[in-house]
Image: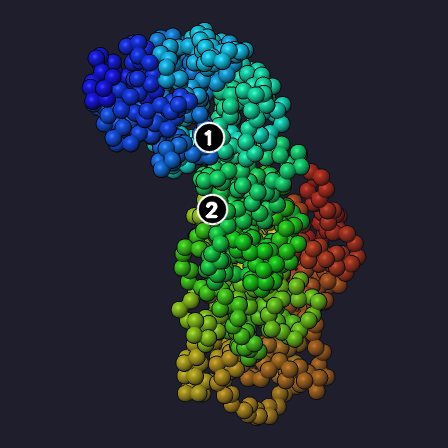
């Protein structure tokens, strides 16, 4: 035939048909020898030993495509699409200079093709181009595995050149017949390939699903299934991932482990294929597993099906769970399975596969490495080589993690300070190549590497570890990309020697009526301020005081804080920052808690605790930290933190103890008013005190706080009191010393001295309290032993109040004292009056009076003058 002439017939190719199959069909239809047909379409002439068409089956030059188009009348683009160049860059990689398929790009086949017998039967022996791909292992139309070779000679098909002097016979084996001893060219095997037995599957079988996913990925040029749904990748990257997992499963998994994950039909075919590997026609795989596609369709189907069981998962975590069996199997077989070694499973793999591998490794990794590789994240990844991330986080992270965060990680047996320090170090390690020791040193070495591992091990053992690690990952990412208002690296290096000088503390105590205490108390306050400002542990504060009791006192401090004292200490902290040029920074700060919303962390949220209830438990019921924490369902450290940030207001009893009179005097007598009364109006301290119903000492202390210079006291004029007048006023009329002193303008002590001078009897406190201004009221004999004692009236009145309640506890709450205090006072009253007054409550029986108690109660109530009359 002349190469410039067109073929005598028009014979269109089938959809998806390979170029060599189409040309063979034309040769068969026209009864033309193969060499003549290739010459007619202007392809490379045959060589003396025959014609090898694998080069143009892979790639056609422009002239070759044009020559075939001219001879056949088919568009050159259609002709080019019938070569493997159609899949170049997706399913194969073609070396165009050498016109060959690069066998190492994902699962290529150096030569040959698989086939579907049913497809050959339906099309008259026409071969699909995709059957040349290593990725082709099943026919999704006829639901079967592709055949690997001839049913008679068992050799692979279309791997050898077609003899030039033969007319192709589509649908039959073109390999030489076996056992041919003649000198002439051997005859062809000629077996009917349409009768080859293949493994068949029901609709929806995993093998068919896997083949369809591969075909769709190649056709679309992108992988968007399973783990690639949110981040689609090119087909090249996707197939590289599939190849990597398939090769790992085929060549490194134990056969029984792999077979257990395959459908029964495929598992049987897999075992049979493994048994034939190594024969002359089915050689062993290459030295580098995964570089070539498996020789058997059953092996390819097994590998791809297992790989897609992993990669078709809905998310990375699920894919990691499905891959973990392969990790554990390799580990049990003695292979080194680490985040670094799994990277060598295959070439050109994607970050998505790395994420799946890291997720699968999670249970095999130490907690520190789980954070380093972010294995519990939605998208795990290897640490960044750029340590600038760690430097950014370091500036934005305190040595002790913020209590608003660290308290959510609280676990039994783990102290809050060491937990906070360990969590801060763990945050710095997220996504970083830093070692634990280096990270700890960068943050001030508040915790040892062993402590970090121990705290994280406790967390890993907790059911909420996935959410706990997610919280640390979110925090690290937030600190990496967000500017925060405090530079903690600078705070750690400030000089805190002059924080809260002694004179400043003394002034705060005066203003807040706080007992200044000794040097230890001052040091406790300084350390508390130091920790809040620096983010370092309190024991790092510069102090010469090494009192062993300081940690205990520091732990107890929050319950003794008051809103007034806390406000003054905040002002002190603000002054300190301003002095160091940091006036624009807040005293304290913490990342927004919205970052951990929705996470189920080990401990309760401090923000969920009712502050009013906490204040009542601490101030009025005087509960311990432990008792308050139990009632609120939280931890002791959370109670301490909340009292430190929301100090409890003082109770009425505390106001009395701390000097409620002083607070009233300060509120009613500002400094300018005091100066007006004392200096300009020349009022005495006593007169000012009397006008406010407070003591002279209270007003004197207030004057010292205001730094008002006091006048020197002037001696009073000598007063002579007549004996008869004094006898009449004190003995006959029964006036009290206070009443007589007020009338004469002297104090009670002066009147008492004149009683001694005139040899007049001085009444006891009870006698004075049981008289009226008009005359003497006798004290009942029964009550006298109690009333003559100091505070006897008060004890008697409290006894009367107690009789009106069912229990001592209820009576104590009404009075506003502790139950133990009321019990002691009633017992003393019983000793003074000579017998038991009350039968204590027990079980469901309320408290009741004894006969003596009933008599005492009746006499006390019959008194004309109240028990608690003014002294």
Q: Which element carries disc 1, helix, strand or loop? A: loop
SS at mark 2? helix
Residue 806: name its quadrant: top right
311 over 141 or under it: above or below: below
Vertical side of 513 occupied by 334: above or below: above
Please determine whether, in this image, residue 378 is positioned above or below residue 558: above
In the picture, the disc for residue 107 is: 1
In the rendered structure, the answer to whether residue 239 lies left or right of residue 834 reads left
In the picture provided, is 503 more to the left or to the right than 77? Answer: right
Where is mark 2, residue-wise?
596
Foreground disc of the pair 2, 1: 1
Q: Is residue 420 left or right of residue 243?
A: right
Kindly tell me whether residue 564 is visible in this rendering: no
The residue positioned 67% from the left and 84% from the top of the image is 753
Find the residue positioned furthest to the right: 834
**Residue 50 appears at what percent x and percent y?**
40, 21
Q: Quadrant of residue 725?
A: bottom right
């Amino acid at each position: 035939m002349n190469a410039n002439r067109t073929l005598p017939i028009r014979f269109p190719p089938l959809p998806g048909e390979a170029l060599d199959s189409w040309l063979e069909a034309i040769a068969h239809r026209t009864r033309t020898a193969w060499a003549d047909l290739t010459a007619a379409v202007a392809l490379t002439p045959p060589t003396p030993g025959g014609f090898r068409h694998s080069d143009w089956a892979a790639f056609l030059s422009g002239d070759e495509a044009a020559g075939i188009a001219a001879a056949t009348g088919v568009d050159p683009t259609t002709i080019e699409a019938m070569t493997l160049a159609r899949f170049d860059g997706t399913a194969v990689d073609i070396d165009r200079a050498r016109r060959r398929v690069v066998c190492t790009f994902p699962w290529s086949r150096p030569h040959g093709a698989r086939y579907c017998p049913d497809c050959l039967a339906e099309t008259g022996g026409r071969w699909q181009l995709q059957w040349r791909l290593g990725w082709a292992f099943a026919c999704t139309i006829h639901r079967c595995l592709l055949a690997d070779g001839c049913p008679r000679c068992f050799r692979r098909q279309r791997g050898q050149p077609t003899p030039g002097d033969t007319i192709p016979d589509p649908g039959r084996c073109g390999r030489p017949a076996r056992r041919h001893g003649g000198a002439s060219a051997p005859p062809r095997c000629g077996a009917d390939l349409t009768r080859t037995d293949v493994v068949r599957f029901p609709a929806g079988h995993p093998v068919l699903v896997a083949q369809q996913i591969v075909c769709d990925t190649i056709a679309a040029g992108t992988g968007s299934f399973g783990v690639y749904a949110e981040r689609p990748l090119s087909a090249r990257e996707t197939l590289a991932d599939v190849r990597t997992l398939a090769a790992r499963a085929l060549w490194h998994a134990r056969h029984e482990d792999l077979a257990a994950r395959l459908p029964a039909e495929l598992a049987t075919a897999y075992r049979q294929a493994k048994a034939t590997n190594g024969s002359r026609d089915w050689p062993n795989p290459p030295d580098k597993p995964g570089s070539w596609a498996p020789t058997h369709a059953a092996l390819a189907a097994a590998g791809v099906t297992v790989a897609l069981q992993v990669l078709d998962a809905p998310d990375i975590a699920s894919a990691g769970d499905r891959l973990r069996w392969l990790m554990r199997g390799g580990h049990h077989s003695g292979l080194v399975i680490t985040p670094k070694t799994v990277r060598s499973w295959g070439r050109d793999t994607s970050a998505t596969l790395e994420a799946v591998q890291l997720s699968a490794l999670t249970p095999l990794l130490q907690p520190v490495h789980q954070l380093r590789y972010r294995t519990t994240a939605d998208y795990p990844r290897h640490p960044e080589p750029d340590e600038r991330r760690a430097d950014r986080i370091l500036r934005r992270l305190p040595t002790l993690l913020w209590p608003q965060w660290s308290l959510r990680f609280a676990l039994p047996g783990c102290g809050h300070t060491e937990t906070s320090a360990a969590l801060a170090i763990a945050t710095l390690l997220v996504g970083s190549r830093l070692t634990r020791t280096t990270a700890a040193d960068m943050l001030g070495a508040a915790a040892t590497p062993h402590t970090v591992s121990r705290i994280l091990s406790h967390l890993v053992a907790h059911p909420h570890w996935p959410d706990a690690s997610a919280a640390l990952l979110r925090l690290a990412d937030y600190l990496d990309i967000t500017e925060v208002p405090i530079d903690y690296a600078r705070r750690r290096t400030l000089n805190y020697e002059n924080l809260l000088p002694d004179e400043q503390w003394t002034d705060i105590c005066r203003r807040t009526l706080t007992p200044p205490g000794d040097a230890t108390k001052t040091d406790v306050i300084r350390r508390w301020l130091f920790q809040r400002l620096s983010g370092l542990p309190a024991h790092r504060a510069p102090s010469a005081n090494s009192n062993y009791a300081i940690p205990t006192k520091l732990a107890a401090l929050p319950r003794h804080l008051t809103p007034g004292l806390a406000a003054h200490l905040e002002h002190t902290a603000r002054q300190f920052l301003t002095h160091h040029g940091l006036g624009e920074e807040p005293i304290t700060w913490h990342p927004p808690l919205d970052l951990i919303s929705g996470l189920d962390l080990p401990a309760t949220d401090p923000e969920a605790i009712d502050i009013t209830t906490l204040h009542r438990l601490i101030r009025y019921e005087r509960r311990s930290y432990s008792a308050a924490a139990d009632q609120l369902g939280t931890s002791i450290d959370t109670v301490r933190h909340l009292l430190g940030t929301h100090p409890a207001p003082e109770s009425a009893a505390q106001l009395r103890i701390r000097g409620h009179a002083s607070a009233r005097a300060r509120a009613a007598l500002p400094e300018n008013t005091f100066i007006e009364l004392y200096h300009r109006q020349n009022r005495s301290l006593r007169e000012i005190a009397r006008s406010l119903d407070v003591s002279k000492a209270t007003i004197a202390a207030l004057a010292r706080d205001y730094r008002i210079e006091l006048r020197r006291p002037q001696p009073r004029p000598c007063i002579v009191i007549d004996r008869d007048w004094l006898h009449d006023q004190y003995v006959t009329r029964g006036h009290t010393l206070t009443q007589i002193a007020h009338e004469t303008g002297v104090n009670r002590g002066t009147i008492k001295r004149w009683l001694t001078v005139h040899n007049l009897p001085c009444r006891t406190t009870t006698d004075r309290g049981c008289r009226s201004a008009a005359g003497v009221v006798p004290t009942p004999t029964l009550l006298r032993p109690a009333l003559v004692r100091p505070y006897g009236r008060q004890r008697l009145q409290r006894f009367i109040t107690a009789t009106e309640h069912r229990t001592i506890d209820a009576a104590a709450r009404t009075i506003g004292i502790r139950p133990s205090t009321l019990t002691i006072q009633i017992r003393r009253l019983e000793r003074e009056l000579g017998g038991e007054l009350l039968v204590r409550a027990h079980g469901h029986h309320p408290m009741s009076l004894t006969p003596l108690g009933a008599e005492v109660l009746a006499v006390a109530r019959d008194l004309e003058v109240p028990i608690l009359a003014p002294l």
